[in-house]
Image: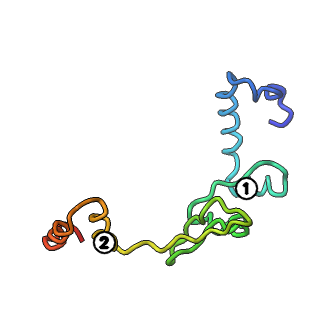
């Protein structure tokens, strides 16, 4: 596609986009993701591989940028945005199942006696 006169300047022509989509798809299917990563490595192309959720925390850019944090053994995205002079707290561990049920029901307006009855009959835990 390099130097293809049909493509020269055509990227701004919306009517050609379906054709371009097909042509680019055919080209991209000629290599694996990892092969494309090697092709673009070290270039100034705006390019990044699509990573799985398992791969993303191990990618060198995400490690350097501290994009992921581990909380209670669970890897998850770090809080964003992150500014150099504004520190953010890491996410807290998840509450235990039912840890806030009683306080939430009371806060939502249920009478404490009704909440007690719900717990006693096993409707909530």
Q: Would you identify the image quadrant in which residue 33 lies?
A: bottom right
> How many numbered badges does the structure rendering display?
2
Give how far across and how far down residue 3 sits, in percent: 86, 33
Q: Name the outermost residue toward the bottom.
A: 72
In this rendering, position of residue 121 left or right of residue 87: left
| Mark number, residue 98 | 2
Quarter residue 99 falls in: bottom left
In the figure, 40 relative to 25: above or below?
A: below
Outermost residue to the right: 3
Q: In the image, which disc is placed on residue 35?
A: 1
Q: Earlier in the sequence, mark 2 or mark 1?
A: 1
Which callout, 2 or 1, points to the residue nearer the camera? 2
Relative to the observer, which residue lies in front, 122 or 74?
Answer: 122
Q: Residues within 10 Å of mark 2 (few under 14, many from 20)?
A: few
Distance between the alpha carbons at the discs numbered 2 and 1: 48 Å
Q: Residues within 10 Å of mark 1 (few under 14, many from 20)?
A: few
Q: Quadrant of the C terminus?
A: bottom left
* Residue lying at 53% horizontally and 75% vertically, measured from the top left: 71
* SS category of the residue bearing label 2: loop
The N terminus - image quarter: top right
> In x, y percent, where is residue 17?
68, 28
Q: Is residue 85 left or right of residue 108?
A: right
């Amino acid at each position: 596609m390099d130097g293809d006169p049909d493509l020269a300047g055509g990227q701004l022509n919306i009517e050609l986009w379906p054709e371009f989509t097909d042509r680019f798809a055919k080209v991209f299917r000629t290599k694996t993701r990892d092969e494309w990563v090697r092709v673009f490595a070290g270039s100034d192309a705006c390019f990044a591989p699509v990573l799985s959720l398992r791969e993303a925390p191990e990618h060198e850019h995400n490690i350097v940028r501290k994009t992921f944090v581990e909380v209670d053994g669970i890897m998850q995205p770090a809080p964003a945005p992150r500014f150099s002079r504004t520190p953010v707290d890491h996410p807290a561990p998840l509450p235990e199942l039912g840890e806030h049920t009683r306080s939430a029901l009371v806060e939502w307006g249920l009478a404490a006696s009704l909440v007690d009855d719900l717990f006693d009959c096993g409707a909530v835990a």
